[in-house]
Amino acid sequence: MDPGTPPAEVDITVDLVRRLIETQLPAYRGLGIEPASVGWDNVTYRLGDGLAIRLPRRQIAVPLIRNEQRWLPTLDLPVPIPVPVGKGNPGDGYPWPWSIVPWIDGTTANRTRLEARGIATLTEFLECLHKRAPKNAPTNAVRGVPLQERAATLMPRLERLRDHVDRSLHTVWKDALEAPFTKDHIWIHGDFHARNVLIDGGDLAAVIDWGDMARGDPATDLAAFWCWVPAGEARWRAMARLGHDSATWRRARGWAFLFSVVMLDSGLVDHPEHAAMGRAGLDLLARHPQFPKG
């Protein structure tokens, strides 16, 4: 896998977005359209004051946006999520489905601090999300899977980062690979990194970007405790309340190592914010113990 942000496979412009709205969802015609963010898989435009438009920028993201359209309305969670309010189809030269979703205010977790009350809200969110999913819920080839399935793609990144990642952290990965894993049907967000979490006044305000949602190993999401959840007593209490066994937390550390390495490797090429997120995760892994006290 090449480092860096994957290139877009289609040119998405304000004019294209305006045409799509006018021809398919004219009820939203006339609202202002402004670029908001560009991710690996999707581009987001703000639509008026209270909405956003989410469009895949790569073919690989098409089933992900369909997952959001199909499954987000079925979740009952204690914080806002961007359940689609409008669904678009290919047209006007654009080849894929797209969504209109609520715009949710907040600051991403890599730019502000989650306070103790926010960590408590996060705990409640994970307790509500990590329930048994239907057997027809989507699976994901790269999230929620046994970590052994990700090892081959991690090794080239570690080689490129040999001067950036302390080799002592490799033991975190080795330990996670050895942690027992039983496949189940637990709902996971799948891409629970800091830029997909919104914070307002120190509290958890929303969780966005659900394209990787799937049934799989909840350790994938629990990696957040070593990627962006601040260390301290509130963090320990949250981990203890969630009550997972040691094998799950060991796998969570492995996912945190994987996510941090990917962020750092790609970020050093063309995304300084991702690089900073990767460094922050590796620092948390290096400085803080594995499990709750007691």
Image: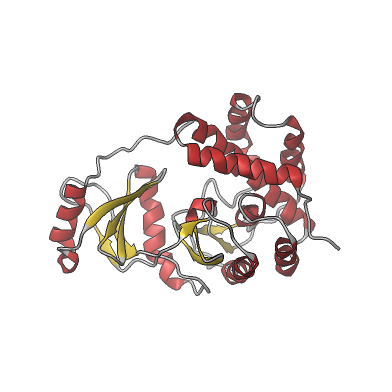
Q: Residue at x 73, y 30 (%)?
A: 167
- Percent position (x, y) of residue 83? 39, 67
- Percent position (x, y) of residue 243? 74, 66
Where residue 258 sits, quadrant-wise, is: top right
In this picture, residue 96 sits left or right of residue 227: left
274, above or below 106, in the image: above
Residue 198 visible in the snapshot? yes
In this picture, residue 185 sits left or right of residue 97: right
In this picture, residue 75 sits left or right of residue 223: left
Assign the C terminus to one quadrant of the image.
bottom right
66, above or below 170, in the image: below
Q: Outermost residue, right direction?
A: 294
- Percent position (x, y) of residue 39? 40, 45
Q: Residue at x 68, y 51 (%)?
A: 252
Q: Residue at x 76, y 66 (%)?
A: 240
- Percent position (x, y) of residue 101? 33, 64
Residue 147 visible in the snapshot? no
Where residue 232 sits, quadrant-wise, is: bottom right
Q: Residue at x 68, y 42 (%)?
A: 283
Q: Nearer the viewer, residue 212 or 105?
A: 105
